Amino acid sequence: MSNKLITSKTVVLPAKDIDTDQIIPARFLTTTTREGLGEGLFRDLRFGKDDEPVADFPLNQPETQGSQVLVGGNNFGCGSSREHAPWALLDYGFRAVISTEIADIFRNNSLKNGLLPIIVDEETHAWLIANPGAEVTVDIVASTLTLPNGQSVTYPIDAFARYCLIEGTDQLGFLQSHLEAIEGFEERRTWTP
């Protein structure tokens, strides 16, 4: 699996204001590990009161299985700051979320955990919403999203966050990769904090 390119069919959840409690309900927040959180992803939307799959929910459709790109409605990821939301999306298999607006805290939590939040213009978003299952290519190095017709749009991403996604690391991993230089600095410094 490349850390530079994502080519996948999309899964579309067009509802606006999908909040973090819808992404991963609070009852699944008792764990401190990421493993298994995908089972709780959109749990109250994916399953009915009888715990049977909701037939018309997009993630329950056979053709969406294995998709790595989720297209959400405006203001995706609003609500509480739970880091479990990007963890659940990642554990389920998503690598990117696309919308016209992604809540700041969710966006930052996503980037810190390896999930790429992509903000696109209204026209591109409308096309994606109207064409569920479209195969798109996300180039993380070039910060582009390419549609099936070859049209590419750029999306904003912080340079350090892009570096971490490409390298498959996080902030701590980045610091640990420079441990020798940090230790060298500590040995050379003449002042005490």
Image: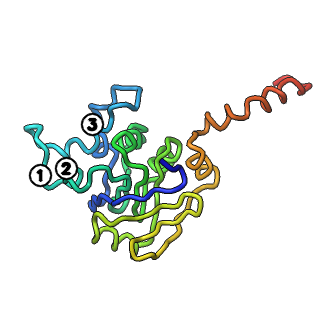
Mark 3 and mark 2 lie on one chain; the one further toward the N terminus is: 3
- Which residue occupies 26% across, 60% down? 15
Q: CA distance from mark 3 to mark 2?
A: 12 Å
Label 2: which secondary element:
helix
Q: In terms of image quadrants, where is residue 40?
A: top left
Q: What residue lies at 54% left-to-right and 57% top-to-bottom?
A: 140
Q: CA distance from mark 3 to mark 1?
A: 17 Å
Q: Position of residue 132 (x, y in %)?
A: 28, 65
N-terminal of the pair, mark 2 or mark 1, is 1
Q: Residues within 10 Å of mark 1 (few under 14, many from 20)?
A: few
Q: Determine which of the numbered discs, if any, sits on residue 192 in the image.
A: none
Give the quadrant of residue 74: bottom left
> Which residue extends farthest right?
190
Q: Is residue 29 left or right of residue 155?
A: left
Q: Are marks 3 and 1 in contact (CB under 8 Å)?
A: no
The residue positioned 19% from the left and 50% from the top of the image is 60
The residue where tag 3 is placed is: 39
Which residue is disc 1 drawn over?
Answer: 55
Label 2, on which residue? 60
Amino acid marked by disc 1:
Ala
